[in-house]
Every structure is written in C-alpha cells, then in structure tokens.
Amino acid sequence: MKLTRDHNRDVWDQRVRKGLLHTRTARDDEFNEPLKAINGRGWIDGRLDGKQVLCLAGGGGLQGPLYAAAGAKVTVLDLSPAMLEQDQRVASERGLDLKTIAASMDNMPMLANASFDLVTQPVSTCYVHNLAEVYKEIARVLRVGGHYLSQHKQPINLQSAPTPFPNGYAITQNYYDKGPLPPLQGDFEHREKGALEFVHRWEELIGGLCRAGFVIEDLAEPKHGEIGAEPGTFQHRSQYVPPYVALKARRIDTPTFSQVASTKIFTP
C-alpha cells in the first residue's frame, strides 16, 4: 500500500507532465521585477540580498527562481522530482543559483537547525495528515526573528460540496475527520484531482502555529470570487466559500522546559 507522500508525489509528477494548474514557471515580466512579483502583500521587509530562503513544498520553477533573482540564497524542498526539475531548468536558463531537495515537508533532517531567515510555503499543508509535525520542522530550521509566509486551504473549502445545491454550497465533510478526503468525480479548481488531502481545523492552522513558537503578524484571505460568475465555477464558489488563507508569522525565542520549570510562581 502506498504511503500518502508517495501517492501525492506521483500525482504531482503527473500534473507537471500534463501541464496542469499550479505547475507553471515564472514569466519574463515577473523576472523584470522579481521582488515585486513575490511580495504582493508587502510582507517581505527590506531586500533579500544574501538572505537564506527555504521555498517549502514550493517547487515548480515559480517561487524559487524569483527569490533567487531577487538576491536570496534559495533552497527549494518539494516532494515531486518533476516540480524540482522545473526549478533546475529555469535556474539554468536564467543563470541563477539555487539548491533543490526532494523530501517531505514534515521530515527535513538534511536541513540544519536555525539555517534560514525566511520560509515561504504555497498551498500544500493539505497534503499531510499531521500539521504539527510540519510546523515543528519549520520552527526548527528557521532562525529566531525569521518569518514564515504561508498559504493554506481553509477548512470550509475542503468541507463544502464542489457544486451548488438549490440553496447553495452545502457542507458535506465532517470537520473532525482524520482520514483523507473522499475523491471527487470531475475536475475542480479547489482540489487537485487524485491527490490525498486532509482538512485541518483552525485550532491546528492557527493554534498549532502559535504552539510551535510563532506569533502571527498578519492574516489575509486572497479574493478569488467574482460576482456574476457562472454557478459551479471556482470564481462563483469562491464568492460563498473562501478558498485560502495567507499567514505572516514570526519565529520567537520560546523558553525551554527547564526555564519554565524553574520559574517561581507567586500567588496572593
């Protein structure tokens, strides 16, 4: 029986070969102003020259090459070798230097502690069962004061039916299910066909990030809805079901257990 990560790796390799959604490489106009292209929300403070950046589950030849073009020292870690091949090809074509690693976001022993100034992650945490392990690894490799910029699928996005019922988009998926979502028949933009995905509750997405040693500095909900869009399309559904959430979080220096245990507590 295939492990979840092996299954999803094969799905994304196939998506690259077919040129499907979310596998495009960076465009010429984006390379003209790379920092502007990757900093649409203004969450990157200052220049990236010499900064160590991890593009986590961010292969595909889009983010990694643009960060490198903006002056960062880039490592791209992704489960899919085909996605990483696109990073290598684009970097070679553009004369850029970046490192690629084929690995899972929840298990990165090849990366040293406190080795990155910035970790950026596109929508991808839905492909792992245990989100806490992902956050734990990010906290480990990120330096204190460093930022984690990420985007995730909102729980309601994965809970709701892909097409509308007469009274709207019904919630059909149990919020507390632990297993992967049942497959959908047909192609829908909010799901990657064939991939195994998991619903992560808000207490896992937000609370888990705080428990891992981060403070949340900003939160955004990218707008993909369009008034008047045809019912059943991604744009129509997004008017009623928010698809994604973006988070800006900063790694803080949390006290160790021994420090907490030795702290005296005074009661009146």
Image (cartoon, rainbow, N blue to C red):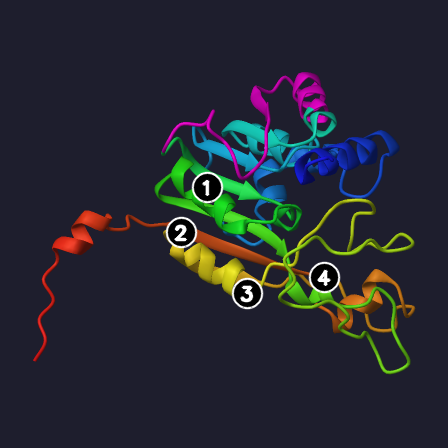
Q: Amino acid at mark 3?
A: Trp
Residue drawn where x is 85% and y is 35% of the image: 19
Question: Which residues are the magenta region?
Answer: 85-113
- Distance of mark 4 from mark 2, alpha carbons? 24 Å
Mark 2 crowd level (few <14, some 14–19, many ≥20, 10 Å Cα): many
Q: Is residue 49 left or right of residue 59?
A: left
Residue drawn where x is 52% and y is 48% of the image: 149
- Distance of mark 3 from mark 4, alpha carbons? 13 Å
Q: Nearer the viewer, residue 245 or 205?
A: 205
Q: Amino acid at mark 2?
A: Ala
Q: Which residue, given by chain and number where applicable, does mark 2 sit on? A: 212
Q: Residue 146's x, y, as percent?
A: 39, 43
All told, the count of numbered labels is 4
- Distance of mark 1 from mark 2, alpha carbons? 9 Å
Q: Earlier in the sequence, mark 4 or mark 2?
A: 4
Q: Earlier in the sequence, mark 3 or mark 4?
A: 4
Residue sitting at the far front: 1
Residue sitting at the far bottom: 167
Q: Which residue, given by chain and number where applicable, does mark 4 sit on? A: 158
* SS class, disc 4: helix
- Distance of mark 1 from mark 4, alpha carbons? 24 Å
The answer to whether residue 24 is seen in the rendering is no
The answer to whether residue 101 is seen in the rendering is yes
Q: Residue 54's x, y, as percent?
A: 51, 34
* SS class, disc 2: loop
Residue 202 disc label: 3
* SS class, disc 1: helix
Q: Which residue, given by chain and number where applicable, does mark 1 sit on? A: 138
Q: Earlier in the sequence, mark 1 or mark 4?
A: 1
Is mark 1 in CB contact (under 8 Å) with mark 2? yes
Residue drawn where x is 57% and y is 47% of the image: 39
